[in-house]
Amino acid sequence: MSSYLSLYELNRRVRSLLTRSLPDECWLQAELSEVHVNSAGHCYVEFVQKDARSNALVAKARGTIWSNIFRLLRPYFERETGQLFMAGIKVLVQVRVDFHELYGYSLVVTDIDPSYTVGDLVRKRREILRQLEEEGVLTLNKELPLPAVPQRIAVISSSTAAGYGDFCNQLENNPYGFRFFPVLFPAIMQGDRAEASILEALDKIHLSVQEWDMVVIIRGGGATSDLSGFDTYLLAAACAQFPLPVITGIGHERDDTVLDLVAHTRVKTPTAAASFLVNRLREAADCLEVLSGSIYTYVQAKLEREKSRIDELARRLPSLVALQRVRQDQRLELLRQRMAIAVERRLQDQKHRLQILGQRLKGCDYRRLLGKGFSVTLKNGHVVTDVSQLSPGDTIVTRLGNGEVTSQVGNLQMDEHLQ
């Protein structure tokens, strides 16, 4: 082979070709897969592009943001987007293509358009909300009834956060003297570990769900760019389906995170969350006061009505007693008359019955039978009804219709046809 190129010469030609064929700068849309800042303040990133259907990588390139640009670009981006400049987000950056004979191909970032990332974040939020709505869980937590007296509060926050201290202080020193019983379930409230940490705290609360009235998720201050952990599907789905009302106060005003949108109630700050709870108890106390006043008024009116009724009865009592006495006297007189009639009727019935019995007795009088020609034979005062009662020589008395005959028994003869 008569001619060849050295690697350096080939890279130099590639560099020259790229310099002539490409504009000085262009806008690039890509996703950050890696972000690293060294001690000198230079930021090294890796740009990637994924297939929309398979999510497989289709392109990759190294990028550099020199420290003098990065110290201006980063706070500007995070302030405008409310999002950390970190791996996993999509960006629209102005780049200059750089090819070095030794270090190869890379992209030098000179500017960034935060509005593109904001739009992508909004799109992601909308996708999460649409997915939750399709699953039928988007508004489940909002539909839970708030307890009238929420005192047992499960709090998810950082144990060292000033906002957690403000929250507890606000509850403890409320002007009405209400008592609350907050218990902290510590969690990491910013960064890429926030999602997993908050989910773990929710799982712990769920194990003792009967012991709590509601869940309060608070975050004490911090940059708006730290809120990306509250815009995830898993955390939103867990809160939307949680069996207790979830109150969020994660310290930002401009935008609502997905977590705010699925929670039962969203307030601005931890202090506002405490005020919400205090006001809830105050409303319950006001309601009880109104009810107690209504009960007192009702009882007083009832007592007045009953007193008036008793007074009226007392005034009417003498006439009522006299009227009742007259009625009872009339009733007794009626009963007496009915009893007299009944007794008279009973006596007549018994008299008639006695007359019938007297007639029957007269018909049974043996003297009447004797008057009709019958006689009665007595021995020693006893009626003789059978010859076997007599013996020859016995003295017997025969009673007739008029008088009696005394005789002595001679011969005895049995009447055979009667035997």
Image (cartoon, rainbow, N blue to C red):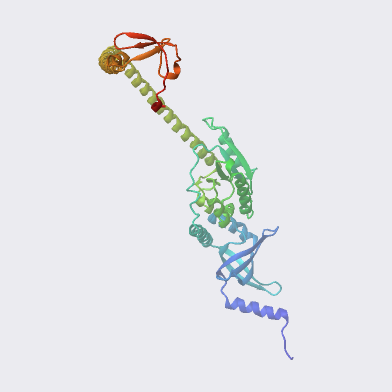
- Looking at the rendered structure, the number of numbered marks drawn on it comes to 0
- Residue furthest to the bottom in view is 2
> For the N terminus, which image quadrant?
bottom right
Position of residue 287 relative to residue 405, above or below, is: below
Residue 174: x %, y % from top left: 54, 32
Residue at the spot x=63%, y=64% of the render? 33
Question: Is residue 300 visible to the viewer in this orientation of the structure?
Answer: yes
> For the C terminus, which image quadrant?
top left
Give the left or right position of residue 306, taking residue 227 as reference.
Answer: left
Q: Nearer the viewer, residue 418 or 101?
A: 418
Give the left or right position of residue 95, taking residue 101 as reference.
Answer: left
Residue at the spot x=45%, y=19% of the render? 388
Residue 387: x %, y % from top left: 42, 19
Position of residue 1 relative to residue 227, above or below, is: below
Position of residue 92 relative to residue 312, above or below, is: below
Position of residue 292 relative to residue 252, above or below, is: above
- Residue furthest to the front in view is 411
- Residue furthest to the right in view is 1
Residue 32: x %, y % from top left: 61, 64
Q: Nearer the viewer, residue 399 or 65?
A: 399
Q: In which quarter of the image is residue 348?
A: top left
Residue 14: x %, y % from top left: 65, 79
Q: Which of 317 and 370 is in front in this view?
A: 370
Question: Is residue 255 visible to the viewer in this orientation of the structure?
Answer: no
